[in-house]
Protein backbone atom coordinates (compact mmCIF):
# COMPACT_ATOMS: atom_id res chain seq x y z
CA UNK A 1 0.00 0.00 0.00
CA UNK A 2 1.38 3.37 -0.94
CA UNK A 3 0.57 6.68 0.68
CA UNK A 4 2.16 9.31 -1.47
CA UNK A 5 1.43 12.95 -1.97
CA UNK A 6 -1.88 12.73 -0.06
CA UNK A 7 -3.17 9.90 -2.20
CA UNK A 8 -3.77 6.43 -0.85
CA UNK A 9 -3.18 3.67 -3.28
CA UNK A 10 -3.48 0.00 -2.68
CA UNK A 11 -2.55 -3.05 -4.72
CA UNK A 12 -4.36 -6.39 -4.58
CA UNK A 13 -2.99 -9.90 -4.97
CA UNK A 14 -2.77 -9.51 -8.72
CA UNK A 15 -0.64 -6.42 -8.15
CA UNK A 16 -3.40 -4.24 -9.60
CA UNK A 17 -4.55 -0.94 -8.17
CA UNK A 18 -7.38 -1.66 -5.68
CA UNK A 19 -9.45 1.37 -4.62
CA UNK A 20 -11.73 -0.82 -2.41
CA UNK A 21 -8.72 -2.14 -0.59
CA UNK A 22 -7.52 1.39 0.01
CA UNK A 23 -10.86 2.45 1.47
CA UNK A 24 -11.02 -0.57 3.74
CA UNK A 25 -7.51 -0.03 4.98
CA UNK A 26 -8.16 3.63 5.59
CA UNK A 27 -11.32 2.79 7.51
CA UNK A 28 -9.35 0.30 9.57
CA UNK A 29 -6.72 2.90 10.37
CA UNK A 30 -9.37 5.44 11.35
CA UNK A 31 -11.11 2.89 13.59
CA UNK A 32 -7.93 1.96 15.35
CA UNK A 33 -7.44 5.53 16.43
CA UNK A 34 -11.06 6.38 17.30
CA UNK A 35 -11.96 6.71 20.97
CA UNK A 36 -15.25 6.34 22.81
CA UNK A 37 -15.27 10.09 23.23
CA UNK A 38 -15.24 10.48 19.47
CA UNK A 39 -18.42 8.39 19.25
CA UNK A 40 -20.07 10.54 21.90
CA UNK A 41 -19.22 13.60 19.80
CA UNK A 42 -20.70 11.96 16.71
CA UNK A 43 -23.90 11.20 18.62
CA UNK A 44 -24.22 14.92 19.31
CA UNK A 45 -25.00 15.26 15.62
CA UNK A 46 -28.08 13.06 15.89
CA UNK A 47 -31.23 15.13 16.53
CA UNK A 48 -34.34 14.05 18.37
CA UNK A 49 -36.87 13.35 15.59
CA UNK A 50 -39.72 15.07 17.42
CA UNK A 51 -37.83 18.09 18.74
CA UNK A 52 -34.97 18.53 16.27
CA UNK A 53 -33.31 21.37 18.20
CA UNK A 54 -32.32 18.77 20.78
CA UNK A 55 -29.63 16.20 20.16
CA UNK A 56 -29.54 12.77 21.80
CA UNK A 57 -27.02 13.91 24.40
CA UNK A 58 -29.29 16.79 25.44
CA UNK A 59 -32.00 14.24 26.18
CA UNK A 60 -29.72 12.15 28.36
CA UNK A 61 -30.81 8.91 26.68
CA UNK A 62 -27.38 7.70 25.61
CA UNK A 63 -26.16 5.80 28.66
CA UNK A 64 -22.96 4.22 27.43
CA UNK A 65 -20.68 3.70 24.47
CA UNK A 66 -18.56 0.53 24.42
CA UNK A 67 -16.12 -1.08 22.06
CA UNK A 68 -16.42 -4.86 21.91
CA UNK A 69 -13.57 -5.94 19.62
CA UNK A 70 -14.48 -4.15 16.41
CA UNK A 71 -18.15 -3.68 17.34
CA UNK A 72 -19.41 -0.35 18.60
CA UNK A 73 -22.17 -0.76 21.16
CA UNK A 74 -24.40 2.20 22.00
CA UNK A 75 -26.59 1.78 25.07
CA UNK A 76 -29.83 3.77 24.86
CA UNK A 77 -32.57 4.20 27.45
CA UNK A 78 -36.08 4.88 26.09
CA UNK A 79 -37.97 7.88 27.42
CA UNK A 80 -41.61 6.78 27.55
CA UNK A 81 -42.74 3.12 27.22
CA UNK A 82 -44.78 3.78 24.10
CA UNK A 83 -42.65 6.50 22.56
CA UNK A 84 -42.81 5.95 18.79
CA UNK A 85 -39.60 7.92 18.32
CA UNK A 86 -37.53 5.25 20.06
CA UNK A 87 -37.13 3.02 17.01
CA UNK A 88 -36.48 6.06 14.83
CA UNK A 89 -33.76 7.20 17.22
CA UNK A 90 -32.13 3.75 17.15
CA UNK A 91 -32.14 3.84 13.37
CA UNK A 92 -30.75 7.39 13.28
CA UNK A 93 -27.85 6.36 15.51
CA UNK A 94 -27.03 3.46 13.22
CA UNK A 95 -27.26 5.57 10.07
CA UNK A 96 -25.10 8.31 11.53
CA UNK A 97 -22.39 5.85 12.53
CA UNK A 98 -22.53 4.17 9.13
CA UNK A 99 -22.22 7.59 7.53
CA UNK A 100 -19.05 8.12 9.54
CA UNK A 101 -17.57 4.91 8.23
CA UNK A 102 -18.46 2.35 10.90
CA UNK A 103 -20.34 -0.79 9.99
CA UNK A 104 -20.33 -3.03 13.04
CA UNK A 105 -22.87 -1.34 15.27
CA UNK A 106 -25.05 -2.67 18.05
CA UNK A 107 -27.82 -0.70 19.73
CA UNK A 108 -28.74 -1.97 23.19
CA UNK A 109 -31.99 -0.84 24.80
CA UNK A 110 -31.56 -0.56 28.54
CA UNK A 111 -34.72 -0.05 30.59
CA UNK A 112 -33.07 0.25 33.98
CA UNK A 113 -32.09 2.64 35.51
CA UNK A 114 -35.25 4.30 34.32
CA UNK A 115 -34.94 7.51 32.29
CA UNK A 116 -35.86 10.69 34.08
CA UNK A 117 -36.00 14.31 32.94
CA UNK A 118 -33.24 14.89 35.53
CA UNK A 119 -30.89 13.49 32.89
CA UNK A 120 -31.71 16.26 30.47
CA UNK A 121 -28.88 18.79 30.19
CA UNK A 122 -29.30 22.44 31.14
CA UNK A 123 -28.37 23.31 27.60
CA UNK A 124 -31.16 21.03 26.40
CA UNK A 125 -33.68 22.79 28.63
CA UNK A 126 -32.64 26.19 27.25
CA UNK A 127 -32.99 24.91 23.70
CA UNK A 128 -36.49 23.62 24.47
CA UNK A 129 -37.56 26.99 25.77
CA UNK A 130 -36.14 28.80 22.73
CA UNK A 131 -38.07 26.35 20.54
CA UNK A 132 -41.34 27.24 22.30
CA UNK A 133 -41.67 24.24 24.63
CA UNK A 134 -41.57 24.91 28.37
CA UNK A 135 -38.82 22.74 29.93
CA UNK A 136 -39.55 20.44 32.93
CA UNK A 137 -39.67 22.00 36.41
CA UNK A 138 -39.87 20.26 39.74
CA UNK A 139 -43.30 19.89 41.32
CA UNK A 140 -43.92 19.39 45.03
CA UNK A 141 -47.45 17.99 45.18
CA UNK A 142 -47.74 16.03 41.99
CA UNK A 143 -49.74 13.19 43.60
CA UNK A 144 -52.52 15.38 44.91
CA UNK A 145 -55.67 15.31 42.83
CA UNK A 146 -56.65 18.60 41.19
CA UNK A 147 -53.38 19.99 42.53
CA UNK A 148 -52.13 23.39 41.57
CA UNK A 149 -49.46 22.26 39.18
CA UNK A 150 -45.85 23.42 38.89
CA UNK A 151 -45.13 27.03 38.19
CA UNK A 152 -44.52 26.78 34.52
CA UNK A 153 -43.22 29.83 32.74
CA UNK A 154 -44.71 30.74 29.39
CA UNK A 155 -41.91 30.17 26.85
CA UNK A 156 -43.22 33.03 24.75
CA UNK A 157 -43.79 35.91 27.21
CA UNK A 158 -42.14 34.46 30.37
CA UNK A 159 -45.22 35.02 32.49
CA UNK A 160 -45.70 32.70 35.47
CA UNK A 161 -49.50 33.03 35.16
CA UNK A 162 -50.13 29.86 33.30
CA UNK A 163 -52.53 26.96 33.82
CA UNK A 164 -52.65 23.30 32.91
CA UNK A 165 -55.15 22.46 30.20
CA UNK A 166 -54.38 18.74 29.99
CA UNK A 167 -51.75 16.41 31.44
CA UNK A 168 -51.72 14.66 28.05
CA UNK A 169 -50.44 16.64 25.11
CA UNK A 170 -49.40 16.17 21.53
CA UNK A 171 -46.88 13.47 22.41
CA UNK A 172 -46.32 11.13 25.34
CA UNK A 173 -43.75 13.49 26.86
CA UNK A 174 -45.78 16.67 26.75
CA UNK A 175 -48.65 18.32 28.59
CA UNK A 176 -50.76 21.22 27.32
CA UNK A 177 -50.69 24.58 29.10
CA UNK A 178 -52.10 28.00 28.41
CA UNK A 179 -50.73 31.41 29.37
CA UNK A 180 -53.19 33.67 31.18
CA UNK A 181 -51.32 36.78 30.11
CA UNK A 182 -50.54 36.39 26.43
CA UNK A 183 -53.32 33.74 26.05
CA UNK A 184 -51.15 31.49 23.89
CA UNK A 185 -51.31 27.73 24.39
CA UNK A 186 -47.97 25.96 24.64
CA UNK A 187 -46.46 22.52 25.19
CA UNK A 188 -44.78 21.61 28.47
CA UNK A 189 -42.16 18.87 28.59
CA UNK A 190 -43.42 16.84 31.53
CA UNK A 191 -41.35 16.11 34.59
CA UNK A 192 -40.79 12.35 34.48
CA UNK B 1 -36.97 -24.11 37.87
CA UNK B 2 -39.05 -27.03 36.58
CA UNK B 3 -41.01 -26.95 33.30
CA UNK B 4 -44.37 -26.34 34.93
CA UNK B 5 -43.07 -23.30 36.78
CA UNK B 6 -41.34 -22.04 33.63
CA UNK B 7 -44.63 -22.29 31.73
CA UNK B 8 -46.52 -20.57 34.51
CA UNK B 9 -43.97 -17.80 34.59
CA UNK B 10 -44.51 -17.32 30.86
CA UNK B 11 -48.28 -17.29 31.44
CA UNK B 12 -47.79 -14.52 33.95
CA UNK B 13 -45.84 -12.38 31.48
CA UNK B 14 -48.54 -12.99 28.87
CA UNK B 15 -51.24 -12.09 31.40
CA UNK B 16 -49.52 -8.76 32.06
CA UNK B 17 -48.89 -8.10 28.37
CA UNK B 18 -52.33 -9.18 27.14
CA UNK B 19 -54.18 -7.12 29.74
CA UNK B 20 -52.35 -3.93 28.79
CA UNK B 21 -52.61 -4.70 25.08
CA UNK B 22 -56.36 -5.30 25.06
CA UNK B 23 -57.06 -2.26 27.23
CA UNK B 24 -54.81 -0.22 24.94
CA UNK B 25 -56.70 -1.54 21.93
CA UNK B 26 -60.03 -0.58 23.52
CA UNK B 27 -58.78 2.94 24.25
CA UNK B 28 -57.58 3.27 20.65
CA UNK B 29 -61.20 2.85 19.56
CA UNK B 30 -61.83 6.29 21.05
CA UNK B 31 -59.35 7.95 18.70
CA UNK B 32 -61.12 10.77 16.90
CA UNK B 33 -64.36 10.14 18.81
CA UNK B 34 -63.61 11.68 22.22
CA UNK B 35 -66.07 14.07 23.87
CA UNK B 36 -63.56 16.95 23.70
CA UNK B 37 -60.22 17.21 21.94
CA UNK B 38 -58.05 17.22 25.07
CA UNK B 39 -59.69 14.07 26.44
CA UNK B 40 -59.49 12.36 23.05
CA UNK B 41 -55.75 12.97 23.20
CA UNK B 42 -55.59 11.85 26.82
CA UNK B 43 -57.22 8.51 25.93
CA UNK B 44 -54.81 8.00 23.04
CA UNK B 45 -51.82 8.85 25.21
CA UNK B 46 -52.89 6.36 27.87
CA UNK B 47 -53.37 3.75 25.14
CA UNK B 48 -49.87 4.47 23.89
CA UNK B 49 -48.36 4.00 27.34
CA UNK B 50 -50.20 0.67 27.72
CA UNK B 51 -49.10 -0.55 24.29
CA UNK B 52 -45.51 0.36 25.14
CA UNK B 53 -45.77 -1.53 28.42
CA UNK B 54 -47.24 -4.63 26.74
CA UNK B 55 -44.55 -4.46 24.10
CA UNK B 56 -41.87 -4.66 26.80
CA UNK B 57 -43.49 -7.75 28.36
CA UNK B 58 -43.92 -9.45 24.97
CA UNK B 59 -40.29 -8.85 24.07
CA UNK B 60 -39.27 -10.48 27.33
CA UNK B 61 -41.68 -13.37 26.75
CA UNK B 62 -40.28 -14.21 23.31
CA UNK B 63 -36.77 -14.17 24.78
CA UNK B 64 -37.82 -16.74 27.37
CA UNK B 65 -39.68 -18.84 24.81
CA UNK B 66 -36.62 -18.81 22.60
CA UNK B 67 -38.56 -20.01 19.55
CA UNK B 68 -37.49 -17.22 17.24
CA UNK B 69 -40.83 -15.43 17.58
CA UNK B 70 -41.30 -11.70 17.78
CA UNK B 71 -43.61 -9.61 19.94
CA UNK B 72 -45.84 -9.19 16.88
CA UNK B 73 -46.35 -12.96 16.64
CA UNK B 74 -47.64 -12.99 20.20
CA UNK B 75 -49.89 -9.97 19.76
CA UNK B 76 -51.29 -10.65 16.30
CA UNK B 77 -51.26 -14.39 15.73
CA UNK B 78 -52.60 -15.92 18.91
CA UNK B 79 -56.23 -16.95 19.23
CA UNK B 80 -58.75 -16.02 21.90
CA UNK B 81 -58.11 -19.06 24.07
CA UNK B 82 -54.43 -18.19 24.27
CA UNK B 83 -54.99 -14.69 25.58
CA UNK B 84 -54.82 -14.29 29.35
CA UNK B 85 -56.11 -10.76 29.89
CA UNK B 86 -58.62 -9.78 32.56
CA UNK B 87 -62.28 -9.77 31.51
CA UNK B 88 -62.54 -6.20 32.75
CA UNK B 89 -60.44 -4.80 29.92
CA UNK B 90 -62.62 -6.43 27.26
CA UNK B 91 -65.68 -4.50 28.36
CA UNK B 92 -67.04 -2.13 25.75
CA UNK B 93 -66.09 1.52 25.84
CA UNK B 94 -69.73 2.56 26.06
CA UNK B 95 -69.97 6.26 26.85
CA UNK B 96 -67.16 8.30 28.39
CA UNK B 97 -68.31 7.43 31.91
CA UNK B 98 -68.20 3.69 31.21
CA UNK B 99 -64.65 4.09 29.93
CA UNK B 100 -63.63 6.18 32.95
CA UNK B 101 -65.05 3.69 35.45
CA UNK B 102 -63.34 0.76 33.73
CA UNK B 103 -60.07 2.71 33.60
CA UNK B 104 -60.31 3.79 37.24
CA UNK B 105 -60.91 0.28 38.60
CA UNK B 106 -58.00 -0.99 36.54
CA UNK B 107 -55.63 1.91 37.31
CA UNK B 108 -55.92 1.46 41.08
CA UNK B 109 -54.99 -2.22 40.69
CA UNK B 110 -52.33 -1.54 38.04
CA UNK B 111 -50.64 1.03 40.29
CA UNK B 112 -50.62 -1.37 43.27
CA UNK B 113 -49.28 -4.22 41.17
CA UNK B 114 -46.46 -2.27 39.52
CA UNK B 115 -45.46 -0.76 42.88
CA UNK B 116 -44.82 -4.34 44.06
CA UNK B 117 -43.29 -5.67 40.84
CA UNK B 118 -40.76 -2.87 40.76
CA UNK B 119 -38.94 -4.68 43.59
CA UNK B 120 -39.14 -8.10 41.96
CA UNK B 121 -36.04 -10.26 41.98
CA UNK B 122 -36.41 -10.73 38.23
CA UNK B 123 -34.58 -7.54 37.30
CA UNK B 124 -35.98 -7.35 33.80
CA UNK B 125 -39.56 -7.55 35.03
CA UNK B 126 -38.73 -5.06 37.77
CA UNK B 127 -37.35 -2.53 35.30
CA UNK B 128 -40.43 -2.81 33.03
CA UNK B 129 -42.62 -2.26 36.09
CA UNK B 130 -40.56 0.67 37.30
CA UNK B 131 -40.72 2.31 33.89
CA UNK B 132 -44.48 1.88 33.53
CA UNK B 133 -45.23 2.89 37.10
CA UNK B 134 -44.27 6.48 36.31
CA UNK B 135 -46.80 6.55 33.51
CA UNK B 136 -49.51 4.66 35.39
CA UNK B 137 -49.29 7.25 38.18
CA UNK B 138 -50.52 9.81 35.64
CA UNK B 139 -53.27 7.42 34.46
CA UNK B 140 -54.54 6.91 38.00
CA UNK B 141 -54.57 10.60 38.71
CA UNK B 142 -56.46 11.27 35.48
CA UNK B 143 -59.12 8.59 35.98
CA UNK B 144 -59.58 9.45 39.68
CA UNK B 145 -60.16 13.11 38.84
CA UNK B 146 -62.70 12.19 36.18
CA UNK B 147 -64.58 9.84 38.54
CA UNK B 148 -64.94 12.81 40.89
CA UNK B 149 -65.92 15.29 38.16
CA UNK B 150 -68.57 12.97 36.77
CA UNK B 151 -69.81 11.63 40.10
CA UNK B 152 -69.92 14.96 41.86
CA UNK B 153 -71.09 16.67 38.69
CA UNK B 154 -74.54 17.20 37.28
CA UNK B 155 -77.54 15.02 38.03
CA UNK B 156 -77.17 13.35 34.67
CA UNK B 157 -73.41 12.74 34.90
CA UNK B 158 -73.89 11.36 38.39
CA UNK B 159 -76.60 8.90 37.45
CA UNK B 160 -74.72 7.77 34.36
CA UNK B 161 -71.43 7.09 36.11
CA UNK B 162 -73.24 5.40 39.00
CA UNK B 163 -74.73 3.00 36.50
CA UNK B 164 -71.26 2.41 34.98
CA UNK B 165 -69.91 1.53 38.42
CA UNK B 166 -72.85 -0.82 39.11
CA UNK B 167 -72.41 -2.54 35.75
CA UNK B 168 -68.70 -3.13 36.21
CA UNK B 169 -68.57 -4.41 39.79
CA UNK B 170 -68.93 -8.04 38.59
CA UNK B 171 -65.61 -7.72 36.79
CA UNK B 172 -63.53 -6.30 39.60
CA UNK B 173 -62.91 -9.49 41.56
CA UNK B 174 -60.89 -11.29 38.90
CA UNK B 175 -57.91 -9.03 39.64
CA UNK B 176 -57.69 -10.61 43.11
CA UNK B 177 -58.73 -14.21 42.48
CA UNK B 178 -55.71 -16.27 41.49
CA UNK B 179 -56.18 -18.90 38.85
CA UNK B 180 -54.36 -22.26 39.04
CA UNK B 181 -51.15 -21.22 37.39
CA UNK B 182 -51.03 -18.07 39.53
CA UNK B 183 -51.46 -20.13 42.69
CA UNK B 184 -48.42 -22.20 41.85
CA UNK B 185 -46.34 -19.07 41.30
CA UNK B 186 -47.61 -17.50 44.53
CA UNK B 187 -46.71 -20.66 46.47
CA UNK B 188 -43.22 -20.55 45.01
CA UNK B 189 -43.07 -16.86 45.90
CA UNK B 190 -42.36 -16.00 42.29
CA UNK B 191 -45.19 -13.47 42.07
CA UNK B 192 -46.80 -11.30 44.77
CA UNK B 193 -49.99 -12.64 46.35
CA UNK B 194 -52.72 -10.70 44.58
CA UNK B 195 -55.27 -11.63 47.25
CA UNK B 196 -53.36 -9.30 49.54
CA UNK B 197 -54.01 -6.37 47.21
CA UNK B 198 -57.78 -6.52 47.66
CA UNK B 199 -57.96 -4.48 50.85
CA UNK B 200 -55.69 -1.71 49.60
CA UNK B 201 -57.59 -1.61 46.33
CA UNK B 202 -60.97 -1.38 48.07
CA UNK B 203 -59.74 1.36 50.38
CA UNK B 204 -58.51 3.51 47.52
CA UNK B 205 -61.61 2.89 45.41
CA UNK B 206 -63.97 3.76 48.27
CA UNK B 207 -61.98 6.89 49.04
CA UNK B 208 -62.39 8.26 45.51
CA UNK B 209 -65.98 7.07 45.10
CA UNK B 210 -66.92 8.75 48.35
CA UNK B 211 -65.52 12.06 47.15
CA UNK B 212 -67.39 11.44 43.90
CA UNK B 213 -70.63 10.89 45.92
CA UNK B 214 -70.89 7.43 44.36
CA UNK B 215 -71.64 4.08 45.94
CA UNK B 216 -70.55 0.54 45.19
CA UNK B 217 -71.91 -2.75 46.49
CA UNK B 218 -69.19 -5.39 46.42
CA UNK B 219 -71.61 -7.96 47.85
CA UNK B 220 -73.64 -7.78 44.65
CA UNK B 221 -70.66 -8.81 42.52
CA UNK B 222 -71.01 -12.13 40.68
CA UNK B 223 -67.20 -12.41 40.83
CA UNK B 224 -66.73 -13.32 37.18
CA UNK B 225 -63.45 -14.96 36.20
CA UNK B 226 -61.99 -16.95 33.32
CA UNK B 227 -59.95 -14.41 31.38
CA UNK B 228 -56.66 -15.61 32.81
CA UNK B 229 -57.47 -19.09 31.53
CA UNK B 230 -58.40 -17.97 28.05
CA UNK B 231 -62.15 -18.01 28.58
CA UNK B 232 -63.23 -14.62 27.41
CA UNK B 233 -66.43 -12.71 26.83
CA UNK B 234 -68.04 -12.59 23.41
CA UNK B 235 -66.48 -9.17 22.83
CA UNK B 236 -62.97 -10.63 22.71
CA UNK B 237 -63.56 -12.12 19.30
CA UNK B 238 -64.48 -8.76 17.83
CA UNK B 239 -61.49 -7.05 19.46
CA UNK B 240 -59.06 -9.60 18.07
CA UNK B 241 -60.68 -9.58 14.65
CA UNK B 242 -60.13 -5.86 14.33
CA UNK B 243 -56.67 -5.95 15.84
CA UNK B 244 -55.33 -8.95 13.96
CA UNK B 245 -56.95 -8.79 10.56
CA UNK B 246 -54.09 -7.03 8.76
CA UNK B 247 -51.36 -9.34 10.03
CA UNK B 248 -53.43 -12.44 9.32
CA UNK B 249 -54.49 -11.31 5.86
CA UNK B 250 -51.02 -10.21 4.81
CA UNK B 251 -48.65 -12.44 6.77
CA UNK B 252 -45.30 -10.88 7.64
CA UNK B 253 -46.45 -7.47 6.43
CA UNK B 254 -44.45 -4.54 7.73
CA UNK B 255 -45.11 -0.83 7.75
Image (cartoon, coloured by chain):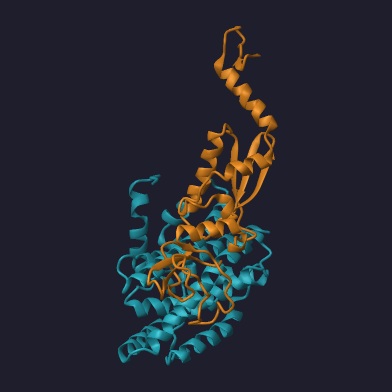
> In the visual, does A109 lie left or right of A179?
right
Could you tell me if residue B43 is visible in this image?
yes
Chain given the colour cyan = B
Q: Which one is in front, B203 or B17?
A: B203
Q: Quadrant of residue A61?
A: bottom right
Q: Residue at x 34, y 77 (%)?
A: B96
In the rendered image, the vertical position of residue B229 relative to residue B254, given as above or below? below
Q: Residue at x 51, y 39 (%)?
A: A95
Q: Which one is in front, A156 or B117?
A: A156
Q: Position of residue B55 (x, y in %)?
A: 50, 57
> In the visual, does A61 lie left or right of B74?
right
Q: Position of residue A7 (x, y in %)?
A: 59, 16
Residue lying at the far top in this picture: please name it: A15
Q: Quadrant of residue B160?
A: bottom left
Quadrant into which the C terminus of chain A falls: bottom right
| Total labels drawn | 0
Q: Position of residue B207 (x, y in %)?
A: 51, 89
In the rendered image, the vertical position of residue A116 relative to residue A164, given as above or below? above
Q: Which one is in front, A45 or A160?
A: A160
Q: Position of residue B7 (x, y in %)?
A: 58, 59
In the rendered image, the vertical position of residue A40 relative to residue B195, given as above or below? above
Q: Residue at x 50, y 89 (%)?
A: B206
Q: Residue at x 55, y 74 (%)?
A: B111
> In the visual, does B9 lie left or right of B85?
right
Q: Quadrant of residue A104?
A: top right
Could you tell me if residue B84 is visible in this image?
no
Chain given the colour orange = A
Quadrant into which the N terminus of chain A falls: top right
Amino acid sequence: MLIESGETRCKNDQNEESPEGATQLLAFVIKMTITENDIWQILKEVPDPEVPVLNLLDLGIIRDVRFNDDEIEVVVTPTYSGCPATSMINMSIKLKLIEKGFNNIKITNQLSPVWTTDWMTEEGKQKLKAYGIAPPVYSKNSDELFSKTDEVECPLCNSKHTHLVSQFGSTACKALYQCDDCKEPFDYFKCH
Amino acid sequence: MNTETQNNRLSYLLYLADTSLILGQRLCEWCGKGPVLEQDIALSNIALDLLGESSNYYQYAVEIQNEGKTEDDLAFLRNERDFKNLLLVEKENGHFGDTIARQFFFDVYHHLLLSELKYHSDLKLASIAEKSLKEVTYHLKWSSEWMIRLGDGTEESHSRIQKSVNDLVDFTDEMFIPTNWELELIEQKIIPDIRAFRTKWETKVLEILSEATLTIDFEKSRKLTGGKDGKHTEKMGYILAEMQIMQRTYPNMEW
